[in-house]
Image (cartoon, helix red, strand yellow):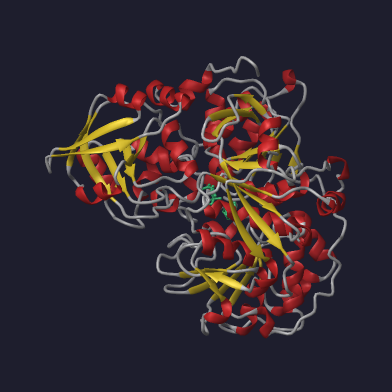
């Protein structure tokens, strides 16, 4: 039986281990990306590894999340990252260049390459036929230092596409549909691989939109084969030479298959507060809007914005609606300003934002109290917009633009428009936003620049017996936005774990930090898919700082589970999910024989308050066991060299 595309790329990059489902392998990482909100931590950790030069073919440090400079904090972060990039040989992409995933697709992604990024939407590169994986900052620091990354060989989920999209339907509607079918945990343990005759009807940026939101499925990554459309896209970006043809063998093995008939996809939304709350727009009724936001790494490509301009052409944004548009990259902004599309948007009454993440991560444009916002983004978790009681819907740029004009969530077919623009244009990138690293190591700067916003990070300790209380018992679907909220007030403090710890879980309870301080830390108990969403390591570093020793849950999201292990916090699951009900908040618990339990993967939690014993499991790889017992990945990785590397 032949190989899927994902397996082929894994095989081509295999450094250590057997390419057998479920077993842990090390792969060579060709490229890395970091962004500023996870990057400060990643470069502090890289610095702690004491290296001279990165080991990858290409590593880029983007500044795209924290670009609202309300005080010195973000500017201090940018300066530190810039100096770390110069010290270790990383390309630096200045604020204004655009969102890391969009710029990466335009300028660096290559079919058949591996990319590791300190952002959960790194899989956007899958639209190019690249195996692009999101991870915690520390994993990316290790990939920069050593050139490798460990992962469990995932299962492969085939998404077989047939036919093509009808006018008004966008690639976004495809992934919203898949999310509706498979849910926010349906992709856990899988790579989503797109195949079938429908693939050729989708452009690289359509494919990137779909791969981007594979993160919302919990998938390890998502990938499309490369083909003529990939070649055309690379040519339009001035780098046709990066093209290689790569696809699955015709008789490839897939663990699961889902069929998607593109011809049946309708304009859709994800309703508040999760990306899998699917509904076709026409089934919604008239939902009145206060705000529409178009942009983000999901839907801010040139073609997306040209469609928006086509819809807005000659019309006006509804008087009750604020429409904000953030182009994905400086290159796109330059193009739409040259061809008049930007003027069309402005004439219609749109507010134009800098190229960056902006409102997607709550950096400005928080809706009014109880406001309703429609966004072309990928996440609508409660409170993420910056307004706790706002209702955020997700949709395609076409649905967003039509709705901005009509004032309620509308199917684009309710508006007359013509897509009379050239889809295949050539882009001429300016290099004005990039700082190339010095190639002569002796001329590199020796010290990074640490302004007063740059603090040290908490260091993990070896996992040991636990005799503590249940500090917090949460339900299902806890996101990293719950554990470490992010908004314009908090994002500037991504290098200050102590300060951020004041806000842990404040979307759920007010006194998490106090509870930890009063009880000398403890454990967290939770339901399904704990830690879904962002790759932010802060969601492990804050609990580490507050003395959390273990999280006991029904299941974990992939990146967060690794972030916990990397900081020597135990992610344990119930052997029997029914036991979740038996534990209460503030129960006194004991987990002993820690070393032995880590080795066997079987743990006994004694609930001393209830006088019961509960069996927990920790399915750790040999490497993960060592990380837990050595007190974190940094200690483990420092001296690690793979013999056959
Ligand atoms: C997000 O979309 O949640 C973020 C902000 O891009 C995060 C990274 C972060 O928290 O800094 C992500 O997706 O990993
Ligand atoms: Fe930025 Fe939003 Fe994309 Fe995260 S999801 S990288 S915040 S645009």
Mark yes or no: residue 450 visible. no
Query: Front-most of 479 and 505?
Result: 479
Image x and y of residue 517, in percent? 24, 40
Query: Front-most of 163 and 204?
Result: 163
Task: Looking at this view, name the residue that lies furthest to the top.
Answer: 643
Position of 411 relative to 454 (above/below): below
- In the image, taking residue 45 as reference, residue 54 lies left or right, namely right
Position of 447 relative to 115 (above/below): above
Position of 310 relative to 294 (above/below): below
- In the image, taking residue 299 as reference, residue 391 lies left or right, namely left
Rendered residue at 32%/49% (across/down): 526
Position of 296 relative to 130 (above/below): below
Image x and y of residue 111, in percent? 76, 42
Residue 618 occupies quadrant: top left
- In the image, taking residue 52 as reference, residue 507 lies left or right, namely left
Mark yes or no: residue 338 visible. yes
Image x and y of residue 41, in percent? 52, 36
Rendered residue at 58%/24% (across/down): 17
Image x and y of residue 258, in percent? 60, 57
Query: Front-most of 519 and 491?
Result: 519
Rendered residue at 66%/33% (across/down): 85
Residue 150 occupies quadrant: top right
């Amino acid at each position: 039986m032949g190989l899927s595309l994902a397996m082929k790329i894994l095989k081509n990059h295999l450094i250590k281990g057997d390419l057998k489902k479920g077993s842990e392998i090390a792969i060579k990482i060709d490229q890395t990306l970091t962004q500023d909100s996870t990057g400060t931590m990643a470069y502090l950790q890289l610095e702690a590894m004491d290296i001279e030069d990165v080991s990858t073919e290409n590593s880029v440090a983007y500044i795209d999340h924290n670009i609202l400079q309300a005080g010195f904090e973000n500017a201090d972060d940018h300066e530190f990252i810039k100096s770390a990039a110069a010290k270790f040989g990383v390309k630096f992409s200045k604020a204004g260049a655009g969102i890391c995933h969009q710029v990466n697709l335009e300028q660096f992604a290559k079919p058949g390459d591996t990319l590791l990024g300190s952002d959960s939407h790194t899989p956007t590169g899958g639209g190019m036929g690249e195996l692009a994986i999101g991870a915690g900052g520390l994993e990316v620091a290790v990939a920069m230092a050593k050139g490798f990354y460990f992962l469990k060989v995932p299962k492969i989920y085939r998404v077989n596409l047939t036919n093509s999209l009808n006018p008004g339907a966008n690639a976004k509607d495809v992934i919203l549909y898949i999310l509706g079918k498979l849910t926010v945990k349906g992709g856990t343990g899988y790579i989503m691989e797109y195949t079938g005759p429908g693939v050729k009807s989708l452009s690289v940026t359509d494919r990137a939109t779909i791969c981007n939101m594979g993160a919302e499925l919990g998938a390890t990554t998502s990938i499309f084969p490369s083909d003529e459309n990939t070649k055309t896209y690379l040519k339009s970006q001035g780098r046709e030479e990066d093209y290689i043809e790569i696809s699955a063998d015709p008789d490839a093995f897939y663990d699961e298959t889902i069929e998607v008939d593109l011809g049946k996809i309708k304009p859709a939304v994800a309703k508040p507060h999760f990306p899998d709350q699917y509904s076709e727009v026409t089934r919604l009724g008239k939902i009145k809007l206060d705000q529409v936001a178009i942009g983000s790494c999901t839907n801010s490509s040139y073609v997306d914005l040209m469609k928006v301009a086509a819809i807005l052409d000659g019309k006006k944004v509804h008087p009750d609606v604020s429409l904000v548009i953030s182009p994905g990259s400086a290159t796109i902004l330059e193009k739409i300003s040259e061809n008049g599309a930007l003027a069309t948007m402005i004439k219609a009454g749109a507010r134009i934002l800098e190229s960056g993440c902006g409102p997607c991560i709550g950096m400005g444009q928080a809706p009014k109290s109880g406001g309703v916002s429609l966004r072309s983004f990928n996440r609508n978790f409660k409170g993420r917009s910056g307004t706790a009681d706002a209702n955020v819907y997700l949709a395609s740029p076409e649905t967003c633009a039509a709705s901005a004009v009509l004032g309620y969530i509308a199917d684009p077919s309710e508006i007359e428009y013509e897509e009379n623009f050239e889809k295949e244009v050539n882009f001429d990138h300016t290099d004005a936003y990039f700082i190339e690293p010095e190639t002569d190591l002796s001329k590199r700067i020796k010290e990074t620049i640490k302004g007063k916003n740059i603090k040290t990070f908490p260091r993990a300790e070896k996992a040991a017996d636990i005799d503590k209380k249940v500090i917090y018992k949460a339900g299902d679907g806890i996101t990293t936005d719950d554990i470490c909220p992010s908004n314009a007030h908090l994002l500037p403090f991504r290098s200050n774990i102590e300060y951020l710890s004041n806000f842990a879980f404040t979307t759920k309870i007010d006194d998490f930090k106090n509870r930890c301080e009063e009880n000398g830390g403890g454990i967290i108990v939770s339901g399904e898919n704990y830690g879904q969403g962002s790759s932010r390591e802060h969601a492990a570093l804050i609990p580490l700082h507050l003395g959390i020793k273990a999280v006991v849950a029904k299941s974990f999201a992939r990146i967060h589970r690794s972030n916990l292990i990397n900081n020597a916090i135990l992610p344990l699951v119930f052997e029997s999910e029914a036991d979740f009900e038996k534990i209460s908040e503030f129960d006194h618990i004991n987990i002993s024989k820690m070393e032995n339990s880590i080795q066997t993967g079987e743990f006994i939690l004694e609930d001393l308050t209830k006088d019961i014993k509960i069996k927990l499991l920790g399915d750790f790889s040999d490497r993960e066991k060592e990380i837990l017992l050595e007190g974190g990945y940094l200690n483990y990785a420092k001296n690690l060299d793979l013999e056959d590397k």
